[in-house]
Image (tube, rainbow, N blue to C red):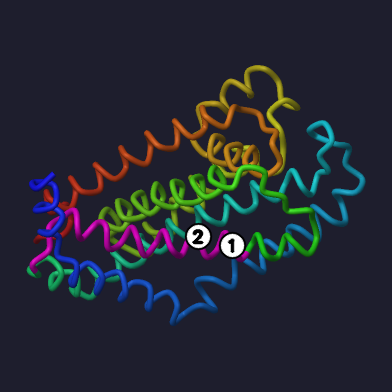
Amino acid sequence: MKRCSENFSLINWVGLTTLISREVRRFIKIWAQSLLPPIITSLLYILIFGHFLGSSIQEILPGVSYIDFMIPGLLMMNVISGAFSNTSASIYIGKFQNSIQELLVAPFSYVEMVLGYIIASTLRGVLVGLGVYIIAIFFTSATILHFWFFLFFILATSILFSCLGAIVGLWGQTFDHINLPQTFILLPLSFFGGVFHSIRLLPDWVQTLSRVNPVFYMVNGIRASMIGSADVGILQAAIVVSILAIIAFILCVYLFRSGYNLRS
């Protein structure tokens, strides 16, 4: 116990909280670009696909209207985008401006560096998710049957994609490199992950392919936590997301420690 408390006290709390505060202030300062667009986009999806067209769509799951089915996936899609874009842009800009060099020579461990970026980006993902949920309250029942699972999937998914965003930020050499994964990887994975449909409506081979998509487990995990029904069990989804988040965090710390695209 004493050894654990000593290790805990060795954390540079002042530096860590300062880094988190800097990153949070960065996206709060540009809230009209970082927080508002996904909420407005979600409102349009809710109105067009959920409210206007959804009324003519039969129930996808027993006893669940289409708009209630769609909301969890829409929420998760924006959580993914918000968390990913925050770290990818922040780290790339730090490299571009050489300001990240100051962080590298500061009395930080590599775990603390990663935690600073990840915690701030996770907060952005959570804020975006809550914004979408608040909008949904006005148009749907927006139920949350399992609050702790709901909170878990938002946090775990934000952590996972914050780590992936950091990895892309380290890898990227141009702004195009930062935008390409969102356009050609994350967006297709989100759409094919069951945001707007149930895989029960798809052919067997497509259902099998969908289960390889990691976003499928995040979307259906939070859907199960909200409406109590999904294409996969909530515990199975939680396990998959937890494993992926841990792997992504370890890889992120490893790349920082190795100086990948950080040291010339």
User: Which residue position holds label 2?
Assistant: 126
Q: Position of residue 197 (x, y in %)?
A: 72, 37
Which of the pair 182/128 is nearer the observer? 128
Q: Give the crowd class for mark 2: few <14, some 14-19, many >=20 residues within 10 Å.
A: many
Image position of 131 with respect to 259: above or below: below
- On the image, the x and y values in percent for residue 218 come to 53, 40
Location of residue 78 in the rendering, given as x and y in whole percent from the top left corner: 56, 56
Q: Contact, CB < 8 Å: mark 2 with mark 1?
A: yes
Whether 113 is among the magenta residues is yes
Q: CA distance from mark 2 to mark 1?
A: 6 Å
Q: Report the residue at 67% width, 43% height from top.
A: 145
On-image quarter of the C terminus: bottom left
- Outermost bottom residue: 29
Residue drawn at point x = 51 percent, y = 50 percent: 154
Q: Amino acid at mark 2?
A: Val
Q: Quadrant of the N terminus?
A: top left
